[in-house]
Amino acid sequence: MCIGAAYDCRFDCKTDNPSVRYSISTYRTHIKGEKGYEVHHRETDVQVVLSGHEAVDGDLPVRCCARPGYFMVFFPGEAHEPGLTSDIQDSVKKAVFKITTGV
């Protein structure tokens, strides 16, 4: 099922572990500030770019460039703005694993 205006397509999936879920999304990168930062209070994000590339800003000392073969981890409370255009706008396919932690 494709959902969300921010995505060309996004599939939300569950696992056998109720504390772990994931989504597979495809979207076009955007300019900084267009969507804003996100922060999770009880979830750790593990983001894996499967194709394309994007820049990511947030509670980081530098802007990161995410591309296939690498992953990013954002712990609860760490603000991040993924999906940013780095050099040119790109189509990105990404898996995001959300791991629920204690309060």
Image (tube, rainbow, N blue to C red):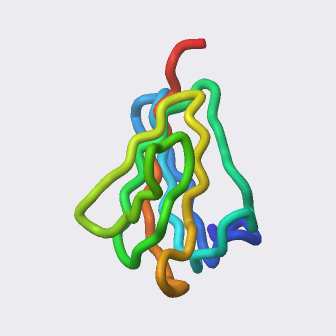
Residue at figure coordinates x 23%, y 63% from the top left = 69
Most foreground residue, 1 or 85: 85
Measured as percent of width and height from the top left, residue 57 is found at 54, 54
In the image, residue 59 sits, relative to residue 90, either above or below, namely above
> What is the x, y in percent for residue 87?
47, 82
**Image location of residue 39, percent across then percent down:** 65, 38
Residue positioned 29% across, 68% down in the render? 68
Vertical relation: 59 (above or below) 42:
below
Residue at the location (41% across, 58% down)?
64
Q: Quadrant of the N terminus?
A: bottom right
Residue 86 against residue 25 in the figure, above or below: below
Q: Is residue 62 left or right of residue 43?
A: left
What residue is rendered at 50% in x and 82% in y?
A: 91
Residue at the outermost left position = 69
Image coords of residue 21 (percent x, y): 49, 41
In this view, the residue in front, 57 or 7, is 57
Q: Quadrant of residue 15?
A: top left
Q: How many marks?
A: 0
Look at the image and tell me in which quarter the C terminus lies: top right
- The extreme top residue here reads 103
Does residue 72 lie above or below 86 as drawn?
A: above
Position of residue 74 in the picture relative to residue 77 (left or right): left
